[in-house]
Image: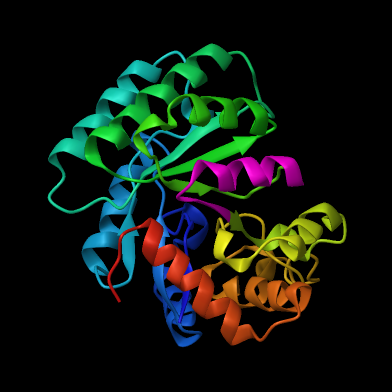
């Protein structure tokens, strides 16, 4: 069994074939799909998936850093209300974090929102799922600052260096999410980090519909370039190749890691 720890399966890119896409994932033994929220606009689609596929779709709740704008307090209030009142269990506070790639207009507000949502996780005893694009150092610093109560979680789409990877490990209870980027030619540093560290520190993710692994990313048929949870198999195969271990070993260890961080029983 494989676990996709991060997939936006409610995205409109799946509107025409969502059922078939889910079936492909299940046929490839990708049986657990963890769904991060983005903001108030994604909640309805997220809930539909969870209600219709409760054995396979597991929700998170949070506000993505790219959604921290002028109305960020309203977005945070809505997410907190859902965390407190939704009729089902959330498995993490996410997707939260910092993104200094697209726009730094609301940099201070992003940092405030991250601290606020980490505090929610502490109160709810939930893991956090962290987005840290062009902001690994700042994100790490905030998590290290607030880690006195044994936080747990995932650094989604890990893009740091080896020293930062060791800092993630030193936090205790945190994992690095490895997705399609590891299959890209330009990702030599990420492959070297995965090669250097034990598999006990990693979980698998797609970030579907984004960041499709090769060979889909460069497929001539553009429709194949959309990422989906079934493609987690390609990511696991690449990790197995980098580590020099069997695919089954990658599947077993990363699935165990996902079960630990999300507090899921087999």
Taking the magenta stretch, the answer to whether it contains residue 170 is yes
Return the residue nearer the eye: 90 or 148.
Answer: 148
Q: Quadrant of residue 244?
A: bottom right
Q: Is residue 236 above or below residue 80?
A: below
Q: Quadrant of residue 186?
A: bottom right
11 lies left or right of 250: left
Tell me the residue at 55%/59% (across/down): 208
Taking the magenta stretch, the answer to whether it contains residue 82 is no
201 lies left or right of 151: right
Q: Is residue 204 visible?
A: no
The structure's colour scheme is rainbow
Highlighted magenta segment, given as a residue range: 162-176
Tell me the residue at 26%/42% (across/down): 125
Location of residue 217 in the rendering, given as x and y in whole percent from the top left corner? 75, 64
Tell me the residue at 13%/39% (across/down): 85
Location of residue 184 in the rendering, given as x and y in whole percent from the top left corner? 81, 61
Location of residue 226 in the rendering, given as x and y in whole percent from the top left corner? 63, 63
Return the residue nearer the eye: 240 or 27.
Answer: 240
Location of the N terminus (image quadrant)? bottom left
60 lies left or right of 138: left
Q: Main secondary structure of the magenta part?
A: helix
Q: Is residue 32 visible?
A: yes
Tell me the residue at 31%/60% (across/down): 263
Location of the C terminus (image quadrant)? bottom left
Tally of marks: 0
Return the residue nearer the eye: 92 or 180.
Answer: 92
């Amino acid at each position: 069994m494989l676990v996709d720890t991060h997939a936006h399966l409610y995205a409109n890119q799946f509107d025409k074939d969502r059922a078939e896409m889910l079936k492909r994932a299940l046929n490839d033994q990708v049986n657990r799909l963890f769904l991060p929220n983005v903001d108030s606009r994604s909640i309805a689609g997220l809930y539909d998936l969870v209600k219709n596929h409760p054995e396979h779709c597991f929700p998170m709740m949070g506000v993505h850093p790219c959604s921290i704008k002028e109305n960020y307090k309203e977005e945070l209030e809505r997410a907190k209300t859902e965390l407190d009142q939704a009729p089902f269990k959330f498995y993490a506070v996410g997707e939260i974090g910092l993104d200094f790639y697209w726009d730094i207009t609301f940099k201070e507000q992003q940092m405030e929102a991250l601290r606020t949502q980490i505090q929610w996780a502490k109160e709810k005893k939930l893991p956090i799922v962290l987005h840290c694009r062009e902001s690994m150092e700042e994100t790490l610093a905030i998590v290290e600052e607030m880690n006195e109560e044994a936080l747990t979680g995932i650094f989604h789409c890990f893009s740091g260096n080896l020293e930062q990877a060791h800092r993630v490990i030193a936090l205790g209870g945190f994992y690095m999410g490895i997705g399609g980027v590891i299959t890209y030619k330009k990702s030599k540093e990420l492959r070297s980090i995965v090669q250097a560290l034990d598999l006990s520190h990693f979980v698998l993710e797609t970030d579907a519909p984004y960041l499709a692994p090769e060979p889909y990313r460069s497929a001539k048929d553009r429709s194949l370039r959309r990422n989906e949870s079934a493609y987690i198999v390609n990511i696991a195969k690449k990790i197995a190749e980098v580590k020099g271990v069997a695919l089954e070993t990658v599947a077993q260890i990363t699935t165990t890691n996902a079960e630990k961080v999300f507090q899921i029983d087999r």
